[in-house]
């Protein structure tokens, strides 16, 4: 691991902000690192308000979208809400369809089959709309590159409204409205919304048209917060506001489907006990709620997720959640098995020294190859693509390492691909089998030419070096107000040098994979510390040998007592 200490902000700016806010200089420096340099910016950061959400009509084509939906309602048209099969897509479909159904009944949903139709808008989905009398399709979390599909629908007198957050190509689909803040001609003030976030802006605009206030829409924010966490978008600007209030809904009055999912899932503690957290954070959304919603589309069908998230009867929701829990168990078994096979393939083919990891096996389950790509990065820290057979083509999921744009790399290899789309860190693609080797070689060459060698070693980005004497109840209280954490607002990471274990170091977990310490620095009071997956570092802490640690400041609750606990990221 590379330990990189972030540059210190100027002493003058730190002192000025610390004085304005009446906080320690450490807190002021952490804020400035996050781009918060004034009193007003800090107030907005610490006190997110729904009043600070932007007017949805600032988004290009929003007026056209609302007008077309209202026309459909006036004319008693059938509306099909179409979305991708992942968390962002299924939550977006659940949000927009349930909102529309609250005052208009001629609304149905459609999630494409991952294996039969693939990602995004499908010709099969358009045929379904045509066969069943739908004249308007609202596409969520997909469609920005669906030029041919929208043209095909137009031939059948079906209109499209596209709500997407992916990067557009050179040409936009000929839809009635294309809502995407990443459009070059869209001046919307915030362009990092997820697909469900775009869906929320649409219902916000529809609500304004019906004299509803933002308070009338808060009940939908549990879905938006779930999508924000799952889609790994920046927790800044509107996303921070939507995530904060969405988490409040999740923790107080979540919809029956999310309530049932939380109840059916338990997190095993290090000691092997099953524990349920009182207050769920974005991290919990990412690791508890999102994988289960995703499992429906990965193992069975995304429709199961929409059924769960739009169900208002708790008993029925509990039944759906139980089924999805089983899908998630099956998903875990599959991704573990395929990861083992992929690692064996890399070793057998002696492909550990390149700049990329690209593997293929025709019978790998398409629903988990994205997870497997992430697992491979944990072992071989390289931009990674995992391929499987899908019909008469190969389909793949790509994942990237920090600060490397895998989407741009794919764009440079586009001549070998039939289709691709995604983000900086995650993308999907299809190609013909005869192009696999040429693509693999081109991808390796492009990455080798464009990646900085440092990016091939995992980095821990450290916010500040502190001593244990700097850790106080006030600091912990203020840091808790930095939440929700996520990209561009990660939980602060601290470095403390020359600490020693007090003799209580021990391994934890079924296979001794975790590390429990009780550490002191000089004459400070001892602090408990835990390092998940760091059991192999036990020897480095023995015999009063000094070592350095990087960590998050956390709290541990045991038998009703709350104590400070350091969550280690690394030690050396």
Image (cartoon, helix red, strand yellow):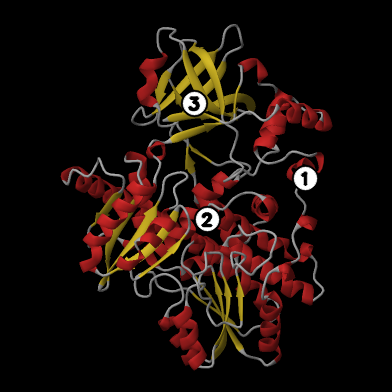
Residue 48 place in picture, x, y as percent:
75, 49
**C-alpha span from label 3 to label 1:** 31 Å
Cβ–Cβ below 8 Å for labels 1 and 2?
A: no
Q: Say which quadrant the N terminus sits in.
A: top left
SS class, disc 1: loop
Give left or right: position of 193 versus 424. right
Give left or right: position of 505 versus 222. left
Cβ–Cβ below 8 Å for labels 3 and 2?
A: no
Residue for point 64% across, 25% down? 561
Whether residue 273 is situated above or below residue 515 in the rendered picture: below
SS class, disc 2: helix
Look at the image and tell me whether residue 470 can be seen.
Answer: yes
**C-alpha span from label 3 to label 2:** 28 Å
Cβ–Cβ below 8 Å for labels 3 and 1?
A: no
Residue 170 place in picture, x, y as percent:
50, 72
> Which mark is on residue 146?
none
Give left or right: position of 255 versus 148. right
Label whose residue precedes the other's in the sequence (3 or 2): 2
Q: Specify few, some or many for label 1: CA neighbours under 10 Å numbering under 14, 14-19, or 20 or more.
A: few
Residue for point 67% across, 63% down? 220
Residue for point 57% across, 13% down? 526
Q: Which residue, given by chain and number where applicable, does mark 2 sit on? A: 231
SS class, disc 3: strand
Q: Which residue, given by chain and number where applicable, does mark 1 sit on? A: 47
Residue in the foreground of this view, choosing between 290 and 442: 442
Q: Say which quadrant the C terminus sits in.
A: top left
> Which mark is on residue 530?
3
**C-alpha span from label 1 to label 2:** 24 Å
Q: Specify few, some or many for label 3: CA neighbours under 10 Å numbering under 14, 14-19, or 20 or more.
A: many
Residue 353 place in picture, x, y as percent:
25, 40
Residue in the foreground of this view, choosing between 568 and 347: 347
Whether residue 419 is situated above or below residue 401 in the rendered picture: below
């Amino acid at each position: 691991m590379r330990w990189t200490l972030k540059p210190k902000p100027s002493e003058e700016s730190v002192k000025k902000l610390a004085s304005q806010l009446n906080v320690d200089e450490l807190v002021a420096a952490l804020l400035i690192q996050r781009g918060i340099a004034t009193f007003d910016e800090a107030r907005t950061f610490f006190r997110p308000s729904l009043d600070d959400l932007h007017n949805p009509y600032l988004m290009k084509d929003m007026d056209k979208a609302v007008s077309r939906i209202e026309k459909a309602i006036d004319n008693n048209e059938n509306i099909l809400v179409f979305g991708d099969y992942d968390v962002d897509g299924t939550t977006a479909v659940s949000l927009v369809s349930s909102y529309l159904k609250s005052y208009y009944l001629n609304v149905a949903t459609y999630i494409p089959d991952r294996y039969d139709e693939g990602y995004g808008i499908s010709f099969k989905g358009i045929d379904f709309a045509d066969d069943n009398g739908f004249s308007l399709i609202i596409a969520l979390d997909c469609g920005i590159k669906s030029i041919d599909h929208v043209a095909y629908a137009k031939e059948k007198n079906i209109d499209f409204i596209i709500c997407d957050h992916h990067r557009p190509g050179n040409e936009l689909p000929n839809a009635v409205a294309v809502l995407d803040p990443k459009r070059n001609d869209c001046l919307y003030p915030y362009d990092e919304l997820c697909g469900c976030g775009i869906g929320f802006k649409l219902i916000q605009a529809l609500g304004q048209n019906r004299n509803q206030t933002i308070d009338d829409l808060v009940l939908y924010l549990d879905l938006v917060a779930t999508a924000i966490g799952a889609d790994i978008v920046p927790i800044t600007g509107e996303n921070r506001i939507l995530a904060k209030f969405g988490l409040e809904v999740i923790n107080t009055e979540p919809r029956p489907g999310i309530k049932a999912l939380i109840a059916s899932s338990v997190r095993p503690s290090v000691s092997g006990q099953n524990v349920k957290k009182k207050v769920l954070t974005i991290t919990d959304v990412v690791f508890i709620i999102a994988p289960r919603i995703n499992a429906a589309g990965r193992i069975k069908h995304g429709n199961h997720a929409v059924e769960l998230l739009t169900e208002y009867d708790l008993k029925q929701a509990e039944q759906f959640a139980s089924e999805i829990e089983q899908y998630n168990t099956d998903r875990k078994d599959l991704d573990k098995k395929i990861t083992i096979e992929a690692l064996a393939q890399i070793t057998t083919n002696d492909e550990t020294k390149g700049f990329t990891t690209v593997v293929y096996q025709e019978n790998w389950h398409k629903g988990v190859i994205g997870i497997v790509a992430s697992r491979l990065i944990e072992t071989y820290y390289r931009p990674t693509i995992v391929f499987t057979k899908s019909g008469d083509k190969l389909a793949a999921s790509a994942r990237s390492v920090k600060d490397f744009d895998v989407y741009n790399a794919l764009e440079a290899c586009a001549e070998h691909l039939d289709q691709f789309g995604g983000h900086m860190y995650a993308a999907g693609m299809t190609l013909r089998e005869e192009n696999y080797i040429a693509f693999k070689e081109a991808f390796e060459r492009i990455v080798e030419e464009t990646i900085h060698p440092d990016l091939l070693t995992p980095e821990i980005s450290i916010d500040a070096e502190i001593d244990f004497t700097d850790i106080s109840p006030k600091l912990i209280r203020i840091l808790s107000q930095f939440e929700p954490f996520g990209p561009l607002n990660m939980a602060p990471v601290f470095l403390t040098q020359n600490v020693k274990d007090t003799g209580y170091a021990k391994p934890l977990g079924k296979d001794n994979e975790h590390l429990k310490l009780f550490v002191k620095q000089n004459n400070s009071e001892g602090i408990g510390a835990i390092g998940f997956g760091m059991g192999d570092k036990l020897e480095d802490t023995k015999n009063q040998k000094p070592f350095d640690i990087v960590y998050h400041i956390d709290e541990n609750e045991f038998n009703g007592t709350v104590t400070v606990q350091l969550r280690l990221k690394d030690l050396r």
